[in-house]
Amino acid sequence: MRTKTSRTKEDSARRERPMAHGAAAHDYFTALADAVRDRKRDILIYAIENHAEETIRWRERFTNKTFLMLLSQYGLDELTARLLKKAEELGLLKELINTTDIRGRSALIFAARFGQNRTMAVLCKNGASTEPVDCYGYTARRYAAERNQPRPLNVVCNPSTMRWLRDGYTR
């Protein structure tokens, strides 16, 4: 049986270990996710161009976020368009575009939630649905409306979106 003192010593020893930089700091981050967060364009282009299928199918551990969701969250619209083009070439666009994470959020929801107008436009032009609802009951439309930026959804998404925004419906 372990004593309270030994547990405290183990915990303090664990806390004193130096944290590594990047993917090793937390086992649930990968080098690819770190490259998105650090906006390392050259690494991301390499991943998309040379390892397209693996990049498209990649999911972040625990959250189940896709590479597309990360690109959308950080507003990397040029890379988002490039990834979607590769997905279309590989026949994976329909599988990728409306995929959701463990909280029901799609790439379009991430773009709307973080105010990434150009990324929302790229996603809508490639067929992203505005209908998925996350675990909080919000859609991409509602996030965009709350951020006062419904324009990309109004301009490039389906005609029902225009009616929905005109009528002031926020869900």
Image: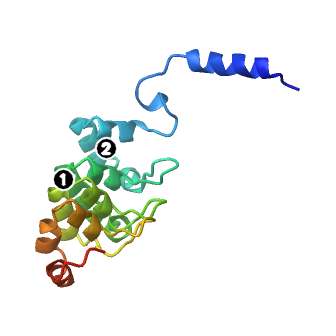
Disc number lying in front (1 or 2): 1
How packed mark 2 is, by other alpha carbons closer than 10 Å (few <14, some 14-19, many 20 or more), is some
Quarter in which the N terminus is drawn: top right
Question: What amino acid is found at the position of numbered circle 2 in the picture?
Answer: Ala
Q: Is residue 20 left or right of residue 52?
A: right
First reached walking from the N terminus: tag 1 or tag 2:
2
Give x and y (percent) for residue 132.
37, 72
* Residue 70 left/right relative to 3: left
Say left or right for 17 vs 23.
right
Question: Mark 1 to mark 2: distance in Å?
Answer: 16 Å
Percent of width and height locating residue 37: 31, 39
Residue holding disc 1: 77
Residue for badge 2 = 47
The image quadrant where one finds the C terminus is bottom left
| Three-letter amino acid code of the residue under disc 1 | Asp
In the depicted structure, whether residue 48 falls above or below residue 37: below
- At which x and y percent is residue 18? 51, 16
In the image, residue 64 above or below residue 98 = above
Q: Residue at x 32, y 55 (%)?
A: 68
Q: Is residue 130 left or right of residue 2?
A: left
Q: Residue at x 16, y 51 (%)?
A: 78
Q: Secondary structure at mark 2?
A: helix
Q: Quadrant of residue 154?
A: bottom left
Closer to the camera in the image, 130 or 56 = 130
Tell me the crowding category of disc 1: few under 14, some 14 to 19, or many 20 or more residues within 10 angstroms, Cα based. many
Q: Can the viewer see residue 52?
A: no
